[in-house]
Every structure is written in structure tokens, then in C-alpha cells.
Image (cartoon, rainbow, N blue to C red):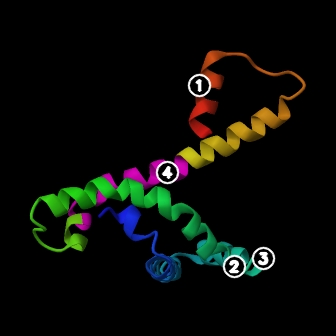
Amino acid sequence: MSLYDLIQDPDKRRTVVDDSNLVLEAEVRSKGFMVKTAFKVVKGIKPGFIPMAIDNLLDDFSQQLDPHYATWDQGGRSGTLEQHFVKNGQTIANDLLSVTDHRADCQVEHREESLQKTAPRSDKAHHNSHAACG
């Protein structure tokens, strides 16, 4: 069973979201004043936003983690999954960043399209990148 399939169970998903939120909060506590302040402002303006954002990213993140999980699983589960993820941390981090980068690109593109309603673009590259954001 894939990680994606596992997190479709509501109880497991809630546990992953809650644990991820705790890890994120611990990471923020180790940062400087500006990061701590920005995090506190976001939490204050919209309570529950951070867990909601984690939940929103979870399906895409789990799909990026699935190949790494499968490699560990099919490799006889040598060591713990955590050890496997730490050993492959840079690759995994890049895979997870590709999710947020893609979403940011799509948001920028959506804003550009909204601004250009009166003068739509017809170049092929713009059209192709829009198809990927669908």
C-alpha cells in the first residue's frame, strides 16, 4: 500500500497533520525573530490555517514520497523508514519543494491571466504551462 493510500484514512491523516504541525512549530521555535513573528501573525489572523495548509499539501507530498517509500519497502526495509528518508534527505526535500514551487507558479500564472483578460496572450509556452496547472 502506498503512503498516499495510507493517508486517505481519516484517523491516520489527522495524526499526520497534527504531527506535521508539531514538527513545523518546533522548527519555527528554533528560528529567528522574523520567522517567529511571521508565523505568529499568520496563526493569529487565521487560526487553523497552518494545519489546513498541511492537509491541503498532504496528498501531493505523499505522492512525491511514494517512490522513496517504495524503494525502502522493496529493498527489504533495511533500517527504518526514517533512516532511509534522512539518507536521501536532499532528494526528498527537492521532490517536496517541487510541489510548492508548482503551486506557486500556478498562482502567479492565474494572477497574470486575470490581469490580461482584456489583452489575452496566445503564445504557446503560456498555454502549455497553464495546462500543467489545471
Cα distance in 3D space between marks 2 and 1: 36 Å
Residue located beneath label 1 in the image: 128
Vertical relation: 87 (above or below) 127: below
Element class at badge 1: helix
For residue 43, the mark is 2
Residue located beneath label 4 in the image: 99
Question: CB atoms at circles 2 and 3 under 8 Å apart?
Answer: yes
Place of residue 50 in the rendered image (x, y in percent of width and height, measured from the top left) = 62, 74
Element class at badge 3: helix
Q: Quadrant of residue 38?
A: bottom right
Q: Quadrant of residue 84?
A: bottom left
Q: Residue at x 51, y 82 (%)?
A: 18
Cα distance in 3D space between marks 2 and 3: 6 Å
Place of residue 59 in the rendered image (x, y in percent of width and height, measured from the top left) = 48, 60
Q: Earlier in the sequence, mark 2 or mark 4?
A: 2
Residue range of the region highlighted in magenta in the rendering: 85-101
Residue located beneath label 3 in the image: 45
Cα distance in 3D space between marks 3 and 1: 36 Å
Q: Which quarter of the rendering shows the C terminus?
A: top right
Q: Earlier in the sequence, mark 3 or mark 1?
A: 3
Q: Residue at x 35, y 58 (%)?
A: 65
Instruction: Based on the picture, tell me whether residue 97 belongs to the magenta stretch.
Output: yes
Q: Residue at x 29, y 64 (%)?
A: 1
Q: Earlier in the sequence, mark 2 or mark 1?
A: 2
